[in-house]
Every structure is written in structure tokens, then in C-alpha cells.
């Protein structure tokens, strides 16, 4: 090992959402003098306006800090990571670039779903874990119980875990000292051929795609010719450096360093996150054990409200793709909405963030169709197709059987909410697996102080709609959720079309479980009746499966009083006028088109 590497520590911060990752990162930057106090802002590493507003980290951010300890100067490379379940992929990339992880646990909340999930991710990556107890300044903080939770649930020694207040800056020096004392230095060799892990990227208008790298062996400097293992493409390095968190150029990046490489790469699509970078002239013998490419799990159509904004929407999605490699999109068209894109997301929060960024950053007015997941349709001819768009659903006669994705779900909640949450999960087609308690001794003595973990196997389709919101309502905000892939299961699914005035509106079609078709059809038709404006003719709204109508509502016609001008006279005059009006409405109904307001699509998303 190089002597220099003894004085480097590469670590990331992981935690459940809102346990104080970004705030601790702020204090570390302040304490080490990396950022001057006058330049300091809250959540400094959350550079996106949306991140600060929502109080969540969306993109991982690396930064280099210097700290003097026992007469030696140390380089601390920190990677701030997201905490939401949708961004587990981002977290796994950070972990691969580190030797250690700070695991933050909120002293008022204890161990929650993502605490456990991220801790297991770190253990799988063979990282040294340093637990830290945060928010000790709050009146409801219970430090000793949190220590017992960390030891009992996670199996991590917590006796030395620093008890801190990231907000007030209490005991931040203890965290820095333990990072140096307890986390291992990188283990690499600067004399070997270059072996660098590409763990993220972003697009710069001047230098092209910039690679975020962790150097495991060798070194790289400006002028070197590099090669990508996965694609075989070669580029000439125009700049190397690190983040403080601003981009700072340097002469060389060597074994143990975390930084960036700019090589005039035209598009981020030319880079594969998790790839190994080496030198063309002297390549390393094999690639680093990368991590799998992310696959979107939730799909939705995004359309511009105004058809002439299609090109602007395409440009906006291209630009977002440069900063978010996990976004996928392809062109599609709808009879009701015109031309747009079918987009794939990591989850509902990811979808919400992308749509909000399109509206804010690019000033676009868009309509989003109801989210769906990827289904496997096995056909009678022996073939199998994957579909996420209901409009691609084959005819019923051609279908042998259908499989839908399922997930293992863990719900963390105080024991008094078990009944509500179990009822909710079973109502969403969940299969109960069991309940475990984090602290059985405490549960015996005080029911409220314990924490239960409910486990279910559930269809992903049931989670992507409103499960998270209903779970929070059922538990008064105390429950937290974690889920991971459990493969596919055979299910009876059907395509439900919505007919407006006898015409199919393809943007409102959904794939539903056969047992829930009536309930869903009734909810959709009732909601559409509220949001579709009345016309001069009657509008029937029908939910149809195959040729069978499962639910129907009618938007009544606006009535014009044609008898107002009749004053007395024979009854046949009045009947004539009424018959004429009736014929006119009939003709209007056959020719009339129903305009669907954009609020209708938003309302359906909320059902």
C-alpha cells in the first residue's frame, strides 16, 4: 500500500429518509473548513431546488475534505446518498466506491425500514459500518433505546456510537475522529495499471459527459488515453480533479482517490454506470465486479397539453436523461392525447420528481397517464411479451396466462397500528408472511415502546398507486416501508377500457386484477362524471372489459327550454318542438366529440 493511502478515508452517509444525512454532511464540511461559513447554506450538497424544498436527497454528491488529526493531514472523501426506497440503486453505487459507511439513526424514531435496508446493502458490500445517533437535541430523543435498537436489530456494536445533533453541531468532532480511527484506508496500488470504477456522471455543456470515479489501482492524468471496459470506446482525458464540493482540477488522480475525469464524451449514453475505466496503452487484466444495470419498475405516459410542445418535451427529457441515467423513455402516441413518450421510472417518487422537474425547469405543461408496471403475457402460440402500456394488451383469445411482478414488503410501525396496516395490505392483495418485534423485552413491559415489522408478499401494481399514502394515514405517519423484488406470479388480469360517448379513450385504459375490476370501474366512472364538463348532449361513461360493461355513469345534457317561446296554442306545437330538439340531440351525440380536461387525468391518478 502507498503511504499516501494510509491517510485517505472513503465513506458515505446512509440513513432512512429525513434522519439527517444532508445536515450531518453540512456540519462535516463546516467543521473541516471545506466550505467557509459565509458560503454555507442548509443542505449544501442538495443543489437542486426540489431537493431543498422536499427535504430529500435525490442525487448522490461526492466531496473531498481535509482534516488534521494527531499531527497528520487526512483526506476524507464523502459521498452523500439518497434515503428513499426508490433510490436504493443510487445508494448501491456509492457503497461500491467506499470502504466504510456512516449509518445515521434518528434518536426520536429509532431503526426504520431504510435504515435496515441500507445497513444490509453496506454489509453485502463488506463495508465497515459506523453508527451515529442523531437529533439528541429533541425532547423526545431516547439515546439508550436507540443504542439497544442498533445492537439488537442491526447486530452492530453501538456502545461507542457518537450521540450528535447535526443541526446544532454537537459532537461532530467525535464523528470525524471515529471515521479516521475505525474506518479502513483504501487498499490499492498506484504502480499497477489503472482500474477505476465509474459510479455516476453528469453532463457539462463545455466538457461533455463528466465521469465520477473511484480509483482502485494506478493513476490517471490529463492527456492519458482511457478505455471503457463495457463499450470498448476510447477517449483522451482533457481534465481530472475532485469536488470540494465545487469542481477543482488537479494534476493526477491515483489509487484511493475519488474524483472526476472529463474526456470530451459527447453523451451520457456512451457511459455505463458501474463500468471499469482503464488505460488504452496499459489496460488492467479484468474489470471490477460492477453492479447490475437499473431496470425501471413503474411506467407512465407523458404528453404535452399543447401538441406543438412535443419537440420541447423531447429536448427536456433528453437533458434530464443526461443527469439521470435511470430515466428511460420511448416515443408513443395516443388517440386521445396525441404524441408523447412512454417513460420508465424507479418508483412513484422518481416519477413525481421527473414530472415536477419538467414543469419547473423547462416550463412545460404536461399530462401524465396512470402509472403501471411491466407484465408478462404468455400467448396461446407459446410466445411471451412484456407490456407496460394497456394499449398493447393482446386480445383475450390470444392470452394463455399473465404474470405480474411481486415484491417482498416490510412495514415498520408501532404495534398499535398492526391491525390497520394488516387490513390495508390484505385489501391490496397482500399475502401475510409474519410479524416480528424489534425489542421483545420492551414490548412486554411497554407495548408502545416496541416496534413491529410486518412482512407481506404483494403485487407491485398495488403499491405504485396509493399504498404509501394510505399506509401513512393508517399509522398517523409512524409507519415506514421497504420493498425488494420477489419475481413474478401468475394472476388473472384484464384490460379495462373507458368508453366516452361510445368511443374508447386509450389514455384512460388500465390493467386490473379480475376480482377488483368492478370496484375500479365504478371508482373511475364516478370520478369522470365529476370532472367531464356537461355538453348539449348526454355523455355515457362506461368501463368495459372485453365486450362486457362493468360500470356506467351518465353526464346529463344541458337543457335548453325550447318551449319558452310557446304561449298557449295546441299541445301538438309543443310536442313538435320537443321532438325536433330530441332529434337534434341524437344527431349531436353521434357527431360530438368529448373534450377531456387535463384535471381528469390528475384525478384518476389519485383514485
Image: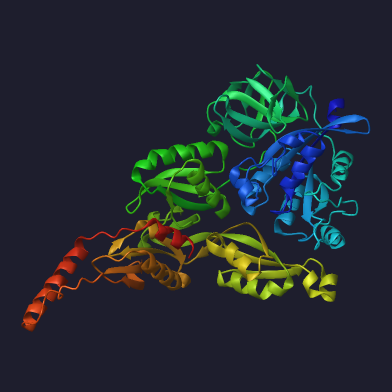
Q: Is residue 198 left or right of residue 439?
A: left
Q: Is residue 209 left or right of residue 281?
A: left
Instruction: Determine if residue 289 is in view.
Output: no
Q: Position of residue 46 (x, y in %)?
A: 66, 42
Q: Is residue 258 left or right of residue 128?
A: left
- For this orientation, the residue located farthest to the right is 70
Q: Quadrant of the N terminus?
A: top right
Instruction: Find residue 207 and report its image quarter.
Output: top right
Instruction: Determine if residue 476 is in view.
Output: yes
- Is residue 183 depicted above or below 350 in this figure? above
Q: Considering depth in this image, is 593 or 186 the residue closer to the camera? A: 593
Point 87% across, 42% down: residue: 173
- For this orientation, the residue located farthest to the top is 223
Q: Which of the colour schemes (rainbow, by chain, secondary structure, one colour) is used? A: rainbow
Q: Position of residue 591 (x, y in %)?
A: 20, 60
Q: Position of residue 143 (x, y in %)?
A: 85, 59
Q: Considering depth in this image, is 467 or 3 the residue closer to the camera? A: 467
Instruction: Find residue 466 and report its image quarter.
Output: bottom right
Q: Considering depth in this image, is 372 or 287 the residue closer to the camera? A: 372
Q: Position of residue 589 (x, y in %)?
A: 21, 65
Counting labels gives 0
Amino acid at each position: 500500500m502507498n503511504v499516501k493511502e494510509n491517510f485517505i478515508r472513503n465513506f458515505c452517509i446512509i440513513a432512512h429518509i429525513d434522519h439527517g444525512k444532508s445536515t450531518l454532511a453540512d456540519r462535516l464540511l463546516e467543521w473541516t473548513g471545506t466550505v467557509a461559513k459565509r458560503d454555507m447554506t442548509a443542505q449544501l450538497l442538495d443543489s437542486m431546488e426540489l431537493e431543498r424544498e422536499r427535504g430529500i436527497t435525490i442525487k448522490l454528491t461526492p466531496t473531498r475534505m481535509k482534516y488534521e488529526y494527531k499531527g497528520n493531514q487526512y483526506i476524507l472523501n464523502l459521498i452523500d446518498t439518497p434515503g428513499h426506497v426508490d433510490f436504493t440503486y443510487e445508494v448501491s453505487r456509492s457503497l461500491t466506491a467506499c470502504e466504510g459507511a456512516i449509518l445515521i439513526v434518528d434518536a426520536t424514531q429509532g431503526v426504520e425500514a431504510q435504515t435496515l435496508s441500507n445497513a444490509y446493502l453496506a454489509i453485502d458490500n463488506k463495508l465497515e459500518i459506523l453508527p451515529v445517533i442523531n437529533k439528541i437535541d429533541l425532547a423526545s430523543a431516547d439515546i439508550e433505546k436507540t443504542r439497544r435498537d442498533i445492537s439488537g436489530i442491526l447486530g452492530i456494536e453501538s456502545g461507542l456510537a457518537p450521540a450528535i445533533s447535526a443541526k446544532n453541531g454537537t459532537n461532530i468532532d467525535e464523528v470525524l475522529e471515529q471515521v479516521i480511527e475505525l474506518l479502513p484506508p483504501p487498499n490499492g496500488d498506484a504502480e499497477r495499471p489503472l482500474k477505476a470504477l465509474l459510479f455516476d456522471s453528469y453532463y457539462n455543456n463545455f466538457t461533455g459527459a463528466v465521469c465520477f470515479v473511484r480509483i482502485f489501482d494506478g493513476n490517471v492524468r490529463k492527456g492519458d488515453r482511457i478505455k471503457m471496459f463495457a463499450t470498448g470506446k476510447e477517449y483522451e482525458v482533457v481534465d481530472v480533479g475532485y469536488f470540494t464540493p465545487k469542481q477543482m482540477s488537479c494534476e493526477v488522480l491515483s489509487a484511493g482517490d475519488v474524483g472526476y475525469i472529463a474526456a470530451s464524451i459527447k453523451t451520457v449514453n456512451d457511459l455505463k454506470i458501474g463500468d471499469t475505466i482503464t488505460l488504452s496503452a496499459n489496460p488492467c487484466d479484468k474489470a471490477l465486479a460492477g453492479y447490475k444495470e437499473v431496470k425501471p419498475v413503474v411506467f407512465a405516459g407523458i404528453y404535452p397539453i399543447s401538441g406543438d410542445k412535443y419537440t420541447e418535451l423531447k429536448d427536456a427529457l433528453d437533458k434530464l436523461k443526461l443527469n439521470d441515467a435511470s430515466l428511460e423513455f420511448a416515443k408513443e402516441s395516443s388517440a386521445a392525447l396525441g404524441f408523447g413518450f412512454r417513460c420508465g421510472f424507479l418508483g412513484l417518487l422518481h416519477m413525481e420528481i421527473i414530472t415536477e422537474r419538467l414543469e419547473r425547469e423547462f416550463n412545460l405543461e404536461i399530462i401524465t397517464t396512470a402509472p403501471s408496471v411491466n407484465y408478462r403475457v404468455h400467448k396461446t402460440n407459446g410466445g411471451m411479451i412484456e407490456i407496460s402500456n394497456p394499449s398493447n394488451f393482446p386480445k383475450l383469445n390470444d392470452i394463455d396466462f399473465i404474470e405480474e411482478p411481486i415484491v417482498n414488503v416490510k412495514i415498520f410501525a408501532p404495534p398499535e397500528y398492526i391491525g390497520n396496516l394488516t387490513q390495508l395490505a390484505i385489501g391490496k392483495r397482500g399475502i401475510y408472511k409474519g410479524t416480528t418485534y424489534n425489542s421483545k423485552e420492551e414490548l412486554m413491559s411497554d407495548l408502545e415502546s416496541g416496534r413491529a415489522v410486518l412482512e407481506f408478499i404483494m403485487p407491485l401494481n398495488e403499491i405504485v398507486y396509493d399504498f404509501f399514502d394510505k399506509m401513512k394515514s393508517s399509522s398517523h405517519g409512524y409507519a415506514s416501508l421497504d420493498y425488494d423484488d420477489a419475481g413474478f406470479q401468475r394472476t388473472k388480469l384484464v384490460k379495462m377500457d373507458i368508453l366516452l360517448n361510445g368511443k374508447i379513450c386509450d389514455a384512460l385504459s388500465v390493467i386490473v386484477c379480475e376480482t377488483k375490476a368492478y370496484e375500479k370501474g365504478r371508482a373511475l366512472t364516478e370520478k369522470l362524471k365529476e370532472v367531464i364538463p356537461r355538453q348539449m348532449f348526454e355523455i355515457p361513461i362506461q368501463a368495459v372489459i372485453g365486450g362486457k360493461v362493468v360500470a356506467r355513469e351518465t353526464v346529463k345534457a344541458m337543457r335548453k327550454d325550447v318551449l319558452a317561446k310557446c304561449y298557449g296554442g295546441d299541445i301538438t306545437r309543443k310536442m313538435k318542438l320537443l321532438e325536433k330538439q330530441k332529434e337534434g340531440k341524437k344527431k349531436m351525440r353521434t357527431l360530438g366529440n368529448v373534450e377531456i380536461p387535463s384535471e381528469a387525468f390528475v384525478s384518476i391518478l389519485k383514485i
